[in-house]
Amino acid sequence: MTQELEYLNMEELSTDEKSSDVNILSPVAPDERIYALDMLRGLAMFGVLWSNLNDWYGTTDPTTSLDKGLTWIHWNLIEGRFYTLLCLLFGIGFGIQLLRATEKGMDLSMVYFRRTLILLLIGIVHGVLIWKGDILTMYALVAFSLLLFRKSSSQSILITGILLWVFYFYIVSRTEILVGWKFYTSSMQGPKIEWTLGHGTCLQIGEIRIAQYLEWYLRYGIRFYGSILATFLVGWWTIKSGYLMRVIQNPRTTRRLLLIAVVASTIGYLCDNYFSLLMPYHNVKITGITDPNFWHPRIIVRSIFGWSTEGTAIVYATVLLLLLQRSTIARLLQPLGATGRMALTTYLTQSVVCTLLFYGYGLGWYGQVGYTGNLIITLVLFSCQMAISSWWLKRFRFGPVEWLWRRLTYGHPIQMRVQ
């Protein structure tokens, strides 16, 4: 495990060897990164872009056969899969940071808190000023809780993650019914709002963006907090137990995980179809504690067996890891890894470009592009991002937003240019 820690990625902490103060923390050098994690982040960034375009910009109903096929692919193979992978990678990154500091005997609490707080501020700025669908805010809020598990054993971390995954949503949803929780509802919905997004001014769209950003967190934040924390804990467990490095370095372990993920995905798809067709509950209105549906364990059962989204995400990740174990393919995929090294910059840039394409203060494409058009935009935009990221990282050690995040976190100058 000691040798493996030497190659932990930039989301770790390291001691600045050039400083006379060994307690000064700084990002590790680019050549100390885990190459495979950069690749996985790049893959996640591609899928997140494709999914966001289909979900958030008024995608038109499918008319052609290709559109219908891409619609099926979106809902069954794309939706939620890459956000799950990204969430797992964030958990791994925060876990690496915690483990590295523990190995060096450092108290990480204040640095970790400051780092997470800055990410929260970036997320709030993103959600309020750029795009309503920000996920960084939630990741930062969950990361604060992860600090509570920094001294926990690998076994307790994994068990806690599993228990959260299985029971959290059931408990929260039933508690909401018992206390008569009334969700915040926004008037920023309907055809008029859709038209404004495609034709309105910057101020008009800004009003909608802020209202919808707040609505999501007030309506769904508490519901999804536990599942995201569970995913973070699994990521933390993979680092602390050493399982992650075995999956990356040992093809047999990678193939075994792929097989498990395929089986889990298959069971998950069967479970999803069973509940959707025979036992739907999304539109079931539960009247109170005496209602039989209040006690029905369908949510828990689905949490145990409904692993289609998570299983498929792991399938994608393990297939990529197996490909990376071939040197020729690994070299061809280097631009994908470059976007992964600049994942935060990549994510924010995607929001800026897409809002300029679709909103009224830009080209106004909102509600005019179908699934085929969104795939074309995804391929073109992400190809540009890979090219720009590759060019940038030949000259600079970090992406611009990554540099700013670290500069504010560590509180001392960080070398930017490649020497």
Image (cartoon, helix red, strand yellow):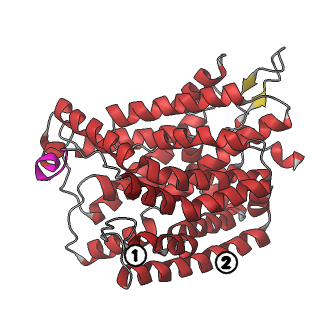
Amino acid identity at mark 1? Pro
Instruction: Establish if 247 lies above or below 410.
Output: below
Rendered residue at 88%/46% (across/down)? 2
Based on the picture, tell me whether residue 108 belongs to the magenta stretch: no
Residue 206: percent from left, percent from top: 24, 33
Residue 120: percent from left, percent from top: 50, 33
Residue most extreme to the right:
2
Amino acid identity at mark 2? Leu
Q: Is residue 419 visible?
A: no
Left or right for 408, reference 178: right
In this view, the residue in front, 122 or 165, is 165
Q: Which residue is mark 1?
A: 292
User: Marks 1 and 2: which is nearer the front?
Assistant: 1
Left or right for 253, reference 70: right
In this view, the residue in front, 352 or 86, is 86
In this view, the residue in front, 102 or 349, is 102
Residue 278: percent from left, percent from top: 37, 85
Residue most extreme to the top:
20
State which tag comes first along the sequence, 1 or 2: 2
SS under mark 1 = helix
Q: Is residue 184 visible?
A: yes
Instruction: Establish if 30 lies above or below 176.
Output: above
Mark 1: few/some/many CA within 10 Å (<14, 14-19, 20+): few
Q: Which residue is mark 2?
A: 259
In this view, the residue in front, 113 or 55, is 113
Q: Which residues are magenta?
A: 187-194
